[in-house]
Image (cartoon, rainbow, N blue to C red):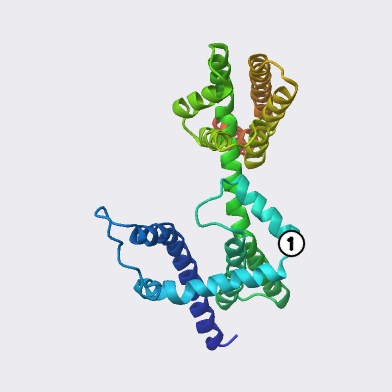
Amino acid sequence: MSSVWLFLAIGSLFLAIVLIGIAIEQTMAEKHRAVRLLESQVTTAGGQAAPRVDLREEELKENFGSRVFVPIVARAGRVARRVTPLDARDRLERKLLVAGSPAGWDAERVLAFKIIGAVAGFIAALLLLQLVDLSSFLQIVVIALLTFVGFVAPDSILNNRVEDRKKEILRTLSDTLDLLTISVEAGLSLNAAIAQVVRNVPGVLSSEFARMLQEIQLGVPRSEAFRHLAERTDVEELNSFALAMIQADIFGVSIASVLRTQAAQLRIKRRQAIEAKAQQTPVKIVFPLVLCVLPALFVVIVGPGAIQIFNSFINLK
């Protein structure tokens, strides 16, 4: 490859990094822009209407990168939406919901970053091939591998966010159910017990319960609110709890007894999971023991004897 391709690869890689940075900056700015526009339209304390805001002037106040490159990212997202199957986009939206609907994240933006990541991986492969001399087959493999890595990188980030959120929910679920059980048995209603949990247990699960309580206060049936809670979290233990509460609400079963049973079952599952991890420990330490500990131990124990035996053979000669 000529030096022209090298400069082109470096410039394209720099452009991709700039696009990603500007898109992240624009994501943070979008959260405050709508609030500023609404505040500008609200009447003042004296009853006089605030001056109208010219949207064009507001657009021109943004920096050059936000006005030029962010529409490119949005256009890439629209192109990705056209070429992406509908079920794949639905799965991505479902994954974003389970991830907690991060601010500034949507399916189109993730798809746009997948395209940008694939282009950046392709350019990085061209740049790497300028520095390393490989055969034609290995060049194709490197280009395909880095392009694939750049394409799946946004999915990997999103999957890690989903897994971290599930682990945090599962970690606080046992204590949350215990507090719910104690509150209901003390005489509080289920809604009041949920409000007690929201006030006293911080974390992701508490925020999800707060959202469910808001839905109930807005008129959503409690069974539907529990179903929405299960859809937003996608944790097996919490899904079982939501299903039990839905059945109790439909058939009129005592809420306190259902909560007590669910809390006991969750403690049993938690203990079984800890025991399963404890049983996996000997298997996990086999390879570090064989590769790291035993060689050093053999050197310390067998080393002096081996040296003496070697010296004895030399003296015999």
**Left or right: residue 206 compared with residue 133:** left
Q: Who is closer to the viewer here, 272 or 97?
A: 97
Write down the quadrant of residue 54 in the picture.
Answer: bottom left
Residue for point 67% across, 25% down? 273
* Residue 109 appears in the figure: yes
Q: Is residue 96 above or below residue 238?
A: below
Image coordinates of residue 234 in percent, x first then y, are: 66, 39
- How many residues crowd mark 1 within 10 Å: few (<14), some (14–19), many (20+)? few
| Count of marks placed on residues | 1
Q: Secondary structure at mark 1?
A: helix
Q: Who is closer to the viewer here, 7 or 32?
A: 32
Question: Which residue is label 1 attached to?
Answer: 86
Image coordinates of residue 100 in percent, x first then y, are: 56, 45
**Left or right: residue 189 compared with residue 83:** left
Write down the quadrant of residue 291 in the picture.
Answer: top right
Residue for point 69% across, 24% down? 249
Image coordinates of residue 279 in percent, x first then y, are: 69, 24
Quarter of the picture holding the C terminus: top right
Furthest residue toward front = 47
Residue for point 49% across, 79% down? 11
Furthest residue toward left = 46
Amino acid beneath label 1:
Leu
* Residue 14 appears in the figure: no
Furthest residue toward top = 186
Write down the quadrant of residue 50 in the picture.
Answer: bottom left
Q: Is residue 3 above or below residue 274?
A: below
Image coordinates of residue 189 in percent, x first then y, are: 56, 19
